[in-house]
Image: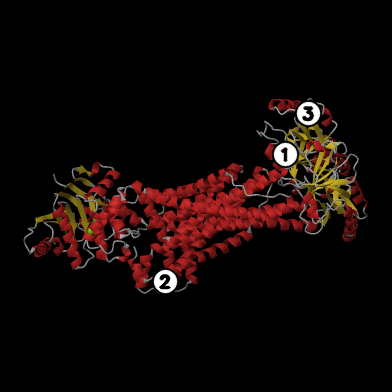
Amino acid sequence: MSLIQAENLTKVYGTGNTAVVALDHVQLTVNPGDFVAVMGPSGCGKSTLLHLLGGLDRPTEGAVSIDGQALAAMSDDAVTELRRRKIGFVFQFFNLIPILTSIENASLPLLLDGKNAADIKQKAVELLTKVGLGQRLDSRPNQLSAGQQQRVAIARALITEPILVLADEPTGNLDTRSSDEIVDLLKQVAKAWGRAVVMVTHDPRIAAYADRIIFLKDGKIVNDAHLEAKRTDNAEMVSHMMRTIA
Amino acid sequence: MKFQLTLAARYLSGRKLRTFLTTLAIVIGVMIIFGMGIYLPSFMDAFNKSLLSASGQTDVMITLKTGEAFSASSTLNRIKRIKGIETIAGSLERTINLPPDFYGKDSPVSALTLTGVDPSVAPKLHDYRLTQGRFLERGDGKVAVISERLADEIGLHVDDTLKLPTPEGVVKLTIVGLVPGRTLIGNEQVLVTLTEAQKLFDMSGRISVIEANLTSQDEAERDAIINTIKTQLGDTYAFGGLTSGSEFAGAMQLGQVVFNMFGVFALAMGGFIIFNTFRTIVAERRNDIGMLRAVGASRKTILSLVLTEGLVQGIVGTAIGLGLGYLLGVAMIAGAGSITKSLMNIEMEVVVEPLLIVVSITLGVGVTLFASLLPAWNASRVTPMEVLRPSSGQVIQHISRLATIVGVVMIGMAIAGLLTGVFAFVALGGVMFLIGLVLVAPALVKPIANIFGALLAMIFARGGTSLLAEGNLTRQPARAAITASATMIGLAIIVGAGGMMFSTVGTVMDMFGKSMGSDFLLIPPSVAVWKGDVGASATLKARINAVPGVGVVSSLRYAQSTLPPSAQTGSKGETVVSVLGINPVEFPQISSMDFRQGNAQDAFNALAANDRNVIVNGILATAANLNVGDVIPLVTPTGIKNYRIVAIGGEVLSMKINTAYISQASMKSDFRKSEDIFYQVNLAPGADPSTVEQRLSKVVENYPQFRLVAGHDYTAEFRQQYNAIFGGFYVLLALLAFPSLIAILNTLAIGVIERTREIGMLRAIGATRRQVWKTIVAEALLLASLGTAFGIFAGLYLSYVFVQGMSASGIFKVAYTFPLAGVLAAIAVGLLFGVLAALLPARQAASMEIVQALRYE
Ligand SMILES: Nc1ncnc2c1ncn2[C@@H]1O[C@H](COP(=O)(O)OP(=O)(O)OP(=O)(O)O)[C@@H](O)[C@H]1O
Ligand SMILES: [Mg+2]
């Protein structure tokens, strides 16, 4: 069974003359272990797609099911619980809670789930160490660099051992080295843990880590390509595809 | 739940200043309610105790329900042979208010209880335990036994003489013995023989208390005996002590209502500030909230998060408020204690009713929770989408059209209510008016901000700072309106209360001038609480009349009475009434009354006609639902007597107390009282005031219980006292206005915090610190002017409503006085508060490090 099943996914913002069709009848299936990159020019609907897949927003038309559960049929609370337990988010803007420490920020979804604080802490420390923040466990977001903050966000996305990780330009604000580390981490999540990862990016080099690339233009999927992990010229290939599409 | 607590604690400690300020608002509200709640009942408690201390430890104690003296022959003689009574005796007890410094300068004794006892029976009823000298003996004349404490306080010993003011002038008694002081608080005791007491007060054959011990200890038998006595005496008598009501208690209840009102105002104010803060807190944390929602916090979690924060603050604020309130209560008791001790001989102790604690906690925590409810609900409606789009972070706030319409409707209804003139509608209108203004405020912000903006532009001429400030306000009308509303409510209360005070003072002074306009007055130690005043017999009046140069003399006499419970008013208990005896011919020549029903000429003629006719004052008429033509049964020492109401009216002496005016002739025949307690004297045409004053002071020399003052001096003195009392209210007002300062500070500070990034950007592109500072101050001034304008408007309305309400309720007619001083004070306070409140955030904004500001989330 596929993990994400999106049918005719359409999102229209506004009405009448000012209506913007951000997504236009998108069909998409993602399976466990998939590492999918979403690419396309600015304003083509990448973020919108991610928000709909994560149940943050409701589509104008069409339907999404995650792990066999149709989001449309669920209450707000049920979708919230689904997000909390099965989906991890990483956003371009880090959106950490400023008054909480790294550990607490990373633990947030479990804390919200009412889990025992002691158990969570151990898990959070483990994850933060894994993302390379073992030394900054008790720092507040404003004491961390952008790359460090993004690692906390990734730790937070992974702490519930979600079946799906949605990342919107997770490396958008990072230097090359941090970007590589982060995307490597996401790849591990997909490959080693067998989860699905959907990542929006503008960077062909980052996209090349994925094993599948979806190109969006004007709210429609214009290309859905598989990459072979063995090849070393994937990045150039992606750049080439981008140019042909634009 | 633990997680919510952690988050709440973090947020609270992360914004220490704000947390402190919001909590302070709750603290002040709870403090006032709790402090006043401690003070007033303690006062009443002490007062009641001092009344109760008059009751001894005998099995039965019988008094007239009104507390007045009664004939011994028709009572004591009738019941003394009832089977089962072991000992029975009548005594005459009288409180004597002493003129200041009667026993030498700074003497702590201000009142005495003189008791005339039967020397042969009294020792069987009470264990007097003499410590020195001997007890009274039959046939003793001007001889007294006094309490040790009194002897100590005035430095007298056995065989010394004790001076006492009486209606026949000062008398001297020889002290023959000392008894230990009373265990209960009360006026110090002077014992004389019953015969002597009756002589001293010209009350021959009269007693005020019957005490008896019974032979049986068996409950049922005792009840049976007491019932037999009751049937013998009839229902004008009280058993076991004085009836609860007293004229003074009535006056106190009014005070309690006023104080409670202040407490509720303060708490409402606190609630408003909390609401205000939580609203801004939620606005400020939109990002965090959206984030929490995105990673899986349910709406309920967010709701309980904000409510938890409110709860924590409510609990902490209430706890501190209780502590400070306790101190306030204790301080007031200590402060007022020395005054009441010397004035009324009441000693107060701190009493905290469990109910008061419950009420204070419920109100404090409840108001906080309630105030955070709406913002919490709003917070739970924040969607993750709102924060995931960084560009859409700060949308321009929309003015809710619905709120504006509801506000306008409420103001309309308030005005309609005012026009009906019905007290309930008028009062309700006042509340609706305030709420309406708060609702309409956002819509009014923009146009008014434009006007004031133009003004400010002139002041801050260059730099575009006022433009920025004005822009900030019009971009966020709702927040601006909330800040302005905080000022508005604070000032509305100042102006409103100011208007009420000016109107009341104005009216009272006017009445005072009419009633106390005579050339000279002879005033007893306590005016309006007449009970303990010792007057003078008719001799004094005759002697005053004989003074050359004296024109008219009018005197007042006093007796205490009650109205029985009545179905007409639904009153379960007895209504306590002060009865004033006037001379219907002399009184109108020298003083005047304001009449609500009936007119002066008919009323005084009716009183002169020697029937049982009465003029009742507005308070009594309203309380007992009385009208001209009604017949009221007044309890008198000679039984219940029916009086017919000929007019409803009053003057300054009866302002706060249920009062009935009857003729002195009726007072003498029904109440057996002919003692004058108050005189008003007018000069004969052409007489020289200072010569007459000298002569008069000679005449009253032997009556130290009276103070001779010129009418205009007394008016000035009264005005001063009145202002002193209202001065206390101003302190309370300031206490109320203080939270509104906090509210402005709060919203401004939040405004600065919210715009941190924006300010950083302004600085980055070249705005100087000075310019940033000016922008914030200009914004504060704008807000303060807005709030002040609204506040004055609302305050004027409120005070007008109050005056209308007072008049509509019929308690007493108040003429409206425009509170010019209040308005000026409000303008000053409003603008001053605005600038004060701006300084801190402005400094903070100006001193912001650019890099830090840009990194701020
Ligand atoms: N709340 C909104 N109201 C109106 N239009 C919107 C809203 N959110 C997005 N849009 C429009 O929908 C389209 C898709 O937006 P979206 O954010 O999904 O693009 P994107 O592919 O993520 O772009 P970028 O790469 O710049 O982040 C855009 O044209 C955008 O203007
Ligand atoms: Mg995007």
Left or right of A228 on screen, residue B547 = right
The residue under the point 28% across, 56% down is A106
Q: Is residue B630 visible?
A: no
Decide if ligand 1 comes within 8 Å of the CB at mark 1.
no
Image marks 3 and 1: residues in contact by CB distance under 8 Å = no
- Label for residue A168? none
Q: Position of residue A120 (x, y in %)?
A: 28, 52
Q: Amino acid at mark 1?
A: Val
Q: Quadrant of residue B291?
A: bottom left
Q: Position of residue B139 (x, y in %)?
A: 91, 40
The residue under the point 54% across, 62% down is B830
Q: Badge 2 local density, few (<14 within 10 Å), some, or many (20+)?
A: few
Element type at mark 1? strand
Asked if residue B184 is positioned above or below residue B491 in the image, the reply reads above
> Which residue is labeled 2 in the image?
B847
- Label for residue B576? 1
Task: For mark 1, name the chain.
Answer: B
Image marks 3 and 2: residues in contact by CB distance under 8 Å = no
Left or right of B210 on screen, residue B430 = left
Q: Earlier in the sequence, mark 3 or mark 2?
A: 3
